[in-house]
Image (cartoon, helix red, strand yellow):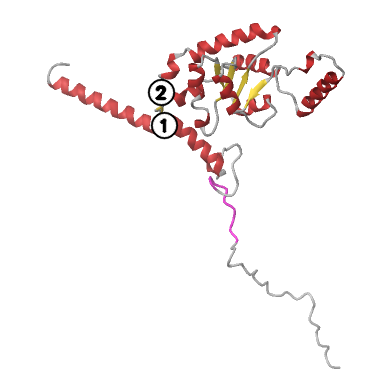
Amino acid sequence: MAPKKGKKSKKESKPASAKASDPVYPSKPRAYGIGGDIRPQGRDLSRFVKWPKYVRIQRQRAVLYQRLKVPPCINQFTKTIAKNEAMTVFSLFNKYRPETPAAKKQRIKEAAAAKASGKEDSSSKAPNVVKFGLKHVTSLVEEKKAQLVLIACDVDPIELVLWMPALCRKMQVPFMIVKDKARLGALVHQKTAAVVALTGVGKEDSAQLKLLQDLAKEKFNNNATLLRQWGGGIMGLKTQAKLDKRAKAMAAEEAKKLASLGKA
């Protein structure tokens, strides 16, 4: 009897084919060292972020304002009123926010109805409200109708309001420089406002307005330091260290000269 041929087992081991590596994106092991693939916890990497252009520009502008010599007429816009004083000023101005379009329409409608019926409506008179708009406030200051003017410190370009403090001083109208244009805009239902002004207040607020006018004259109108004090000229840390080192070396050299002459 012929011997049976042995069947090849299906589980015969095949040679393992090496996984083809991608030449474009070769695999590499993760690096766990500093600067590797895994970011260490708690490390601030904001210095290495590529910030948007507008962020870079406003930061560079802030640095330039520190480095360059800033003339007094521009530097005065960095001297804003304190937080507590600003709270008092804005609480007064909040009472005299202008009407919304709907409220104004209703007031005019009621006034027309009263006039048609032959009655004198005392409430038809326009109430004391905050005035805004650069041209409008300028005309009020020139006519000496404005009783207190608020100027934003961060108007861009600054040339829009650069002359306003000088005009207020000439016309003897009290003014204050405050933070910031968005806060002024919120008073008058706008996004931003460069200047706002009050032309009058009720009897109950006249004493507070008088106090704020005296404060404005003391800190801004009659403050001669604002017109003389230059700003900027602050060097960076590296430059300051270099200048200090140079000054010490010069002082040491001078001391050696005096010692050699016997004058030390």
Whether 148 is drawn above or below 9: the answer is above
Secondary element at image label 1: helix
User: Residue 57, percent across and down?
Assistant: 51, 40
What residue did someone put label 2 on?
A: 230
Around disc 2, counting alpha carbons within 10 Å, would you say few (fewer than 14), some (14 to 19), or many (20 or more)?
A: some
- Is 102 displayed left or right of 222 in the figure? right
Residue at position x 81%, y 20% in the image: 111
**Which of marks 2 and 1 precedes in the sequence?**
1
Disc number for residue 67: 1
Residue at position x 13%, y 22% in the image: 260
The part of the image, by quadrant, that contains residue 140 is top right
User: Residue 251, percent across and down?
Assistant: 25, 23
Disc number for residue 119: none
- From the viewer's side, name the closer residue of 190 and 88: 190
Whether 237 is drawn above or below 207: the answer is below
- Is 80 displayed left or right of 113 in the figure? left
- Residue type, mark 2 in image: Trp
Residue at position x 57%, y 44% in the image: 52
Q: Which residues are magenta?
A: 27-35
- Is 15 displayed left or right of 174 in the figure? right
